């Protein structure tokens, strides 16, 4: 069996030069999107080609291993990520075809016709619920599609959905990122959950204000500060309590329910003095449509696809249900090692304390996958709304044709990510961050931010850099719990700029080919928020160390 050990400083044993070379695929990808206005699949394929060549020519990775890493990433991009995107857009298309989304739109407008309030309810509070239940791009797809249906223009809908999907990410998919971080570091799960829960609540309060400011400006944000504070503070308090006194599993779900409930109560007693809408909207027409009333039964039927979606996604995310659906081995669950790649790549010091073979397992859990829960909720919704099976098939085929190039893009993005990971390019960039000495607490969350930007997942970033954070923290004399939790907390701010999320947002808002514009819309917000996390971690390291939970004896 062919095996290969990663070399993290391949360019003349010079770390800065090696890190600059390792960053080239990311520079190519983001540069093509942001400055050359290339189509997303073109930029992704060019970035992949750059990563592949560097893996071979600079890092010395054997070609068979590089090819299988690329294939593994592309397969993961199609399943489960692509399957989630396709199924989410399928549900949205069903609501459009049946006309029910118009009723949903009126019901939300009846609760709050102000675009700022709608953004808080959907992009922040409801998106957090979907993140907690499913994660992996689902909340961006759903929130962005709902904002489009409410009349938001495509670019703001995509950007606001991405920006809103930040603070909940560390506890997404029933706490998966924290669970993975505990697994790779060996640190106690409850302690890591509590540590992240003493970092992110500050940003859970900030993000609603930031969200409205990004959309409408500072002055308009001040007009709705009670709503921003209510949405953020209710979520933050429950986020802190659940993460510290229960664990990582239900943090987002409990926090989002509290946030939505608090917003509904607030809106019964308070409304903004002026109703803010986009410049392109006709205020007179919007006021007329906001007054349309529907019966409770009609409104409930219109909301049924989204209610079923929430129920299915939540149930599918429960470990007991997932284990049951995966129990039919050979029928609903297939897990096998990727040929030639599994255990063939060795991670070495200083990324890990002892050499460790990298697993490469592909899981095809078609029944328990989140995308399947979305697909089934769409089919059931369509049948209950009176669509015939043939009509559902036609809608699904139309959705598939609409997102086919986006699926190619996602496959190429994940292929780039996996090639970068197995070749060790990501670890080289991580070591460059880790070499910052006493400033490391500031750069520690930026390393997590980089990891999510590269991999598209807070879970993957924690697996990638968790050990490195722990080792570096011990070397510079800060608490390992602080550095490892900072990886997850900083990573959430990278979620809005990772290529996978941008492509998902582009698909959901009908902006395929405009991914560079979406990236430019959110990049500044992502970087500044990540730096603010760095400031908080720096203060927790040297000024407020008592904020971190004590390690259990």
Image (spheres, rainbow, N blue to C red):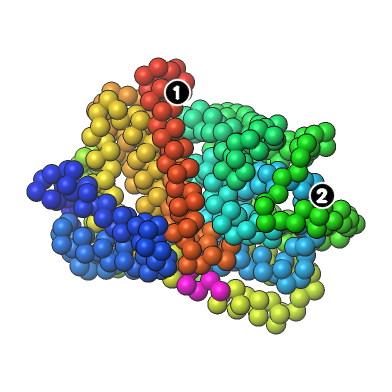
**Quadrant in which residue 474 is drawn:** top left
Vertical relation: 528 (above or below) 376 = above
- Counting residues from the start of the chain, the first of labels 2 and 1 encountered is 2
Q: Nearer the viewer, residue 414 or 389?
A: 414
Give the spatial CA distance, label 2 vs label 1.
44 Å
Q: Nearer the viewer, residue 167 or 71?
A: 167
Label 1, secondary structure: give it.
Answer: loop
Q: Main secondary structure of the magenta part?
A: helix
Q: In front: mark 2 or mark 1?
A: 2
Label 2, secondary structure: give it.
Answer: helix
Q: Is residue 221 left or right of residue 507?
A: right
Query: Percent position (x, y) of residue 135?
Result: 54, 51
Query: Percent position (x, y) of residue 136?
Result: 51, 54
Is any part of residue 91 visible from this angle? yes
Q: Is residue 264 magenta?
A: no
Q: Is residue 434 left or right of residue 323?
A: left
Quarter in which the C terminus is drawn: top left
Residue at (24% x, 41% y) in the render: 431
Residue at (41% x, 35% y) in the render: 531
Quarter in which the N terminus is drawn: bottom left
Label 2 Cα neighbours within 10 Å, binned few <14 / some 14-19 / many ≥20 = some
Query: Percent position (x, y) of residue 53?
Result: 21, 64
Label 1 Cα neighbours within 10 Å, binned few <14 / some 14-19 / many ≥20 = many
Q: Is residue 128 left or right of residue 186?
A: right
Query: Percent position (x, y) of residue 443?
Result: 33, 34
**Range shown magenta:** 402-407
Q: Which residue is mark 2?
A: 110
Q: Which residue is mark 1?
A: 548
Q: Is residue 23 left or right of residue 167?
A: left
Residue at (80% x, 58% y) in the render: 285
Vertical relation: 427 (above or below) 299 = above
Is any part of residue 335 visible from this angle? no
């Amino acid at each position: 069996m062919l095996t290969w050990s990663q070399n993290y400083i391949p360019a003349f044993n010079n770390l800065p030069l090696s890190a600059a070379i390792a960053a080239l695929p990311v520079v190519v990808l983001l540069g093509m999107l942001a400055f050359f206005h290339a189509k997303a699949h073109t930029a992704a394929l060019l970035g992949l080609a750059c990563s592949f060549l560097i893996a071979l020519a600079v890092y010395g990775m054997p070609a068979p291993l590089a090819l299988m890493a690329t294939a593994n990433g592309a397969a993961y991009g199609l399943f489960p990520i692509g399957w989630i995107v396709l199924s989410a857009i399928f549900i949205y298309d069903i609501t459009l075809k049946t006309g029910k989304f118009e009723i949903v739109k009126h019901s939300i407008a009846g609760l709050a016709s102000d675009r700022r309030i709608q953004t808080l309810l959907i992009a922040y509070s409801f998106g957090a619920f979907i993140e907690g239940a499913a994660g992996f791009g689902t909340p961006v797809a759903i929130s962005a599609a709902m904002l489009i249906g409410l009349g938001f223009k495509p670019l703001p809908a995509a950007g606001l959905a991405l920006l809103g999907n930040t603070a909940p990410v560390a506890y997404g998919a029933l706490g998966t990122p924290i669970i993975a971080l505990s697994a790779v570091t060996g640190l106690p799960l409850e302690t890591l959950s509590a540590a992240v829960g003493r970092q992110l609540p500050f940003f859970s309060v900030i993000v609603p204000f930031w969200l409205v400011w990004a959309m409408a400006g500072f002055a308009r944000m001040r007009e709705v500060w009670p709503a921003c504070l209510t949405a953020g503070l209710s979520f933050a308090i429950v986020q802190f309590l659940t993460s510290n006194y229960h664990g990582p599993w239900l943090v987002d779900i409990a926090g989002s329910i509290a946030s939505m409930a608090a917003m509904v109560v607030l809106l019964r007693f308070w409304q903004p003095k002026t109703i803010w809408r986009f410049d392109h909207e006709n205020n007179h027409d919007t006021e007329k449509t906001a007054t349309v009333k529907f019966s409770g039964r009609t409104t409930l039927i219109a909301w049924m696809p989204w209610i079923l979606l929430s129920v299915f996604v939540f149930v599918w995310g429960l470990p007991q249900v997932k284990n049951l659906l995966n129990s039919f081995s050979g029928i609903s669950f297939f897990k096998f090692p990727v040929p030639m790649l599994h255990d063939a790549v060795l991670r070495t010091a200083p990324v890990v304390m002892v050499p460790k073979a990298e697993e490469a397992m592909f899981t095809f859990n078609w029944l328990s996958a989140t995308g399947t829960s979305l697909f089934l909720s769409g089919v059931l919704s369509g049948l209950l709304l009176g669509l015939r099976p043939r009509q559902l098939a036609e809608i699904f085929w139309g959705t598939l044709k609409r997102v086919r190039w986006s699926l190619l893009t996602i496959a190429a993005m994940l292929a780039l990510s996996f090639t970068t990971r197995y070749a060790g390019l990501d670890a080289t960039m991580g070591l460059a961050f880790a070499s910052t000495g006493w400033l490391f607490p500031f750069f520690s969350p930026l390393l997590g931010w980089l990891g999510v930007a590269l991999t598209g997942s807070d879970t993957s970033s924690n697996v990638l850099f968790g050990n490195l954070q722990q080792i570096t923290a011990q070397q510079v004399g800060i608490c390992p719990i602080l550095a490892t939790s900072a990886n997850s907390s900083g990573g959430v701010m990278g979620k809005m700029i990772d290529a996978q999320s941008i492509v998902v947002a582009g698909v959901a808002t009908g902006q395929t080919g405009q991914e560079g514009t979406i990236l430019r819309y959110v990049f500044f917000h992502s970087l500044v928020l990540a730096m603010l996390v760095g400031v908080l971690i720096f203060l927790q390291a040297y000024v407020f160390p008592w904020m971190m939970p004590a390690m259990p004896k």
